Amino acid sequence: MNGALRLTVLGAGYLGITHAACMASLGFEVLGVDTDERKAGKLNAGRLPIYEPGLEELLRAGLGAGRLRFTTSYAEAAAFGDVHFICTGTPQQPGSDRADTSQVHACVATLAPLLHRPCLVVGKSTVPVGTARRLAAGLGHACPGAELAWNPEFLREGTAVADTLSPDRIVAGVTSGRAEAILRQVYARPVAAGTPFIVTSLETAELAKTAANAFLATKISFINAMAEVCEVAGGDVRALARILGADPRIGGSFLRAGLGFGGGCLPKDIRAFAARASELGAGQALAFLREVDAINLRRRVRTADLALELAGGSLAGVPVCALGAAFKPGSDDVRDSPALDVAQILTGMGARVTVHDPAALPAARRARPELTYARTLAGAVRGAHVVLLLTEWPEFTALTPGDLSPLVARRNIVDARGALDPVPWQRHGWRYRALGMAEGAAAAMRAATR
Ligand code: UGA
């Protein structure tokens, strides 16, 4: 395999589209494959089916340069590619904590019999440890010239392009020097720019991804557990996080207390990781991840309870404004969105909830059609008795009491992302409540600044 490598990317979801467009921008010829004809057509027309800053420009540049296109044909991909990246989804199985790896298995099973020349098949999807070894055996059987490697992806939604072009590390799970050499060729540019390239086994590469997500989830739930203690002890979790984060051994990132983690990755990955460990007989080792999950889900209920308190003990018929639907700012993804869950809980408590989000309204409407949505911020806030900040979009965190006071019927705000300064809100007669801060602690902050 000499000269310029030709790459295919199998599965045009978040990961696949980003990987395909980024690899094309690095100068490779790339063929993206998705069985959804409409999606492939849309991508070929330069239109993104997802919201991701900077990605559409990259997609169009790749298409325009003739280095990138999309197809539905696996046969075409097999004939085209020297390296095939598997980027299909691994969602949570319905009614189980396990990951559903059927798309990954189907992808390799479809591709393998079509491969008639030496190539490297590279898994990027997040899979339970042991999956790659099974896939490798099947692949080698179907096509002796094909080899499998595992190269997990650590990109975050909202910063997917930068994370792909300048990753923190590249993990190459390989079983031969040839596979390592091909991956070094693919990632020559970021490696030359200083990204560490870590060569390891298939199993360690699979674990690298699930362990990283488990650690991040644990860090968030740790600070949210501290928030629970702060609420009853009169502490302030934001100050506590700053103090903890100043210790370089702890580090300040992923210590933002609040409504906790959601999305298509962290929640399902910790569940699947714990389930896989149990299957392997190491269930006890990851039992703590169940607590990480429980702490995270408790924050949603606690947020709704703060709104209930501010409403005076009953939410029946009370107009409530929910600011945010996406699982985090910079994304229109509403999978396992804490914001939408809170809106749903409040609705269940009898509130008349109106949801607004700058990017995720179409996705939210599809996922939870039973909720009420407002296209404008003012439309959502007008007449509210309680406003909840649930996703920390910059346009929400920049809001001042002067913006909202003329619109609301009552001045009550729940800052579920700890993103606002309580002092100006309280000065303007708002009752301000945040996770990880007792009401008295917020009032004390106000007194201290007088
Ligand atoms: C996560 C990982 O960060 C990526 O490294 C990984 O590649 C990706 O999952 C994946 O498995 O594909 P992502 O789901 O895009 O990325 O989002 P994060 O930025 O990790 O945020 C996850 C959730 O945690 C969000 O709901 C966010 O609001 C919440 N969060 C994050 C906090 O509550 N506190 C924090 O301090 C940080």
Image: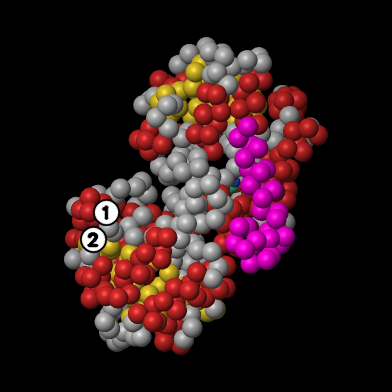
User: Can you identify the residue that label 1 sits on?
Assistant: 36
User: Residue at image x 45%, y 23%?
Assistant: 354
The part of the image, by quadrant, that contains residue 135 is: bottom left
Q: Are marks 1 and 2 in contact (CB under 8 Å)?
A: yes
For badge 2, the amino acid type reads Thr
The numbered mark at residue 201 is: none
For badge 1, the amino acid type reads Asp
The Cα–Cα distance between marks 1 and 2, rounded to whole angstroms, is: 7 Å
Does residue 394 sit above or below 25 in this rendering?
above
Whichever of callouts 1 and 2 sits on the residue coming sooner in the sequence is 1
User: Viewer-proximal residue, 94 or 315?
Assistant: 94
Q: Is residue 314 magenta?
A: no
Q: Main secondary structure of the magenta part?
A: helix
User: Viewer-proximal residue, 449 or 423?
Assistant: 423
User: Viewer-proximal residue, 276 or 165?
Assistant: 276
Looking at the rendering, the stretch of residues picked out in magenta corresponds to: 274-301
- Residue 340 location (% of width, % of height): 49, 34
Q: Is residue 155 left or right of residue 53?
A: right
- Residue 387 location (% of width, % of height): 54, 23
Q: How is the image coloured?
A: secondary structure
Q: Is residue 361 visible?
A: no
- Quadrant containing the N terminus is bottom left
The part of the image, by quadrant, that contains residue 359 is: top left
- Quadrant containing the C terminus is top right
Residue found at the far right of this picture: 233
Does residue 217 sit above or below 3 in this rendering?
above
Q: Is residue 167 left or right of residue 13?
A: right
User: Can you identify the residue that label 2 sits on?
Assistant: 72
User: Residue at image x 52%, y 29%?
Assistant: 344
Establish whether ligand 1 lies closer than 8 Å to the Cβ of label 1.
no
Marks counted in the figure total 2
